[in-house]
Amino acid sequence: MSAQVIDGKLISDTIREEIKADVASLLEKGIRPGLAVVLVGEDPASQVYVRNKAKACEDLGFYSEVHRLSAETTQDELLQLIDKLNGQASIHGILVQLPLPKHLEEKPVIDAISVVKDVDGFHPINVGNLMIGDDSLLPCTPAGCIELLKRTGNSPAGKHAVVIGRSNIVGKPVSLLLLRENATVTICHSRTPNLPEVAREADIVVAAVGVPKMVKRDWVKPGAVVIDVGINRLPDGKLCGDVDYDDVAEVAGWITPVPRGVGPMTITMLMANTLKAAKRTNGIQ
Ligand code: NAD
């Protein structure tokens, strides 16, 4: 058996076309979705992410601002900028690129972003709304995982989903979203005994661990859907996921590759969130 590939790039391109069409109709009403990205310091990976976000804004017709602050920026200076962006009408979404330099605390920064502009979905009120199932801005990578499932006809409803990883940015929110989609959800982590055995029970496996090629074929039930969130760099410089792709693809029914799987969905869902924030601010459904 050879798994069907879930092409995250292709699905992401389709969603971007849908967003573009929505932006065109907003522009007719004089509304242009706006995203502000804040980068503190010179972390090379963060610089690439920020450039990609600015490029996505340009491609989709969004207004965007990139605020590049020096590594010496103080907590107060950063909070002042967020306060200013919170009050700026042209900005519907604010994203502070994480991680921040060590002398800055992340939590007060996340808490300071206006709930309605929190397009990363990390503000405690948005996290709480996700928990109780209210409408909210959803964290981008988990929302991207759900889109990949739905758009390949793999609805989570009635399925047993096993999520490996319990981080606040991926494992926990993707578990809540799967639950919202009526899956039966098991959350595993570094202290789960018999992990391969638990994973083998799953109709859907989501791996968000950060350990290269950890999930092997004997962890996966034949025909299961495997969503690999991991992005790991191997010593030879190549990227790989948390799933041993070649091995697992022989038993899985569906599988996301790395790259071209979950990765491209993250920025696309950020754009979708910014569009949603712009619509909400203007009272458009
Ligand atoms: P994290 O380090 O915050 O959390 C990892 C989780 O895995 C923890 O909950 C931990 O309990 C669990 N874990 C660690 N070792 C384990 C083991 N041996 N067995 C079982 N569970 C174990 O990481 P994160 O931020 O959730 O990211 C996870 C992976 O996803 C990383 O590779 C990261 O680069 C990637 N990621 C990708 C995207 C994307 O856009 N595709 C976005 C965010 C994160």
Image (cartoon, rainbow, N blue to C red):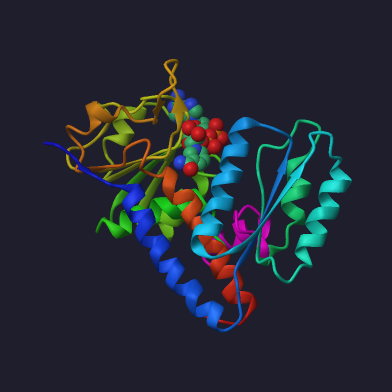
Q: Quadrant of residue 26?
A: bottom right
Q: Examine the structure image and report whether residue 131 is included in the region drawn in magenta.
A: yes
Residue drawn at x 31%, y 27% is 244
Looking at this view, name the residue that lies furthest to the top: 235
Q: Which residues are magenta?
A: 117-133
Q: Quadrant of residue 74?
A: top right
Of residues 186 and 77, the one drawn nearer to the viewer in this rendering: 77
Residue drawn at x 81%, y 32% is 103
- Residue 16, position as x, y percentages in the image: 42, 61
Quadrant containing the N terminus in the rendered view: top left
- Residue 269, position as x, y percentages in the image: 48, 57
Of residues 144 and 171, the one drawn nearer to the viewer in this rendering: 144
Residue drawn at x 82%, y 59% is 83
Q: Note whether 57 is above or below 186 in the view shown.
A: below
Residue 271 visible in the current orientation: yes
Residue 173 lies left or right of residue 72; in this view the side is: left
Of residues 163 and 88, the one drawn nearer to the viewer in this rendering: 88
Residue drawn at x 44%, y 21% is 237
Q: Quadrant of residue 225?
A: top left
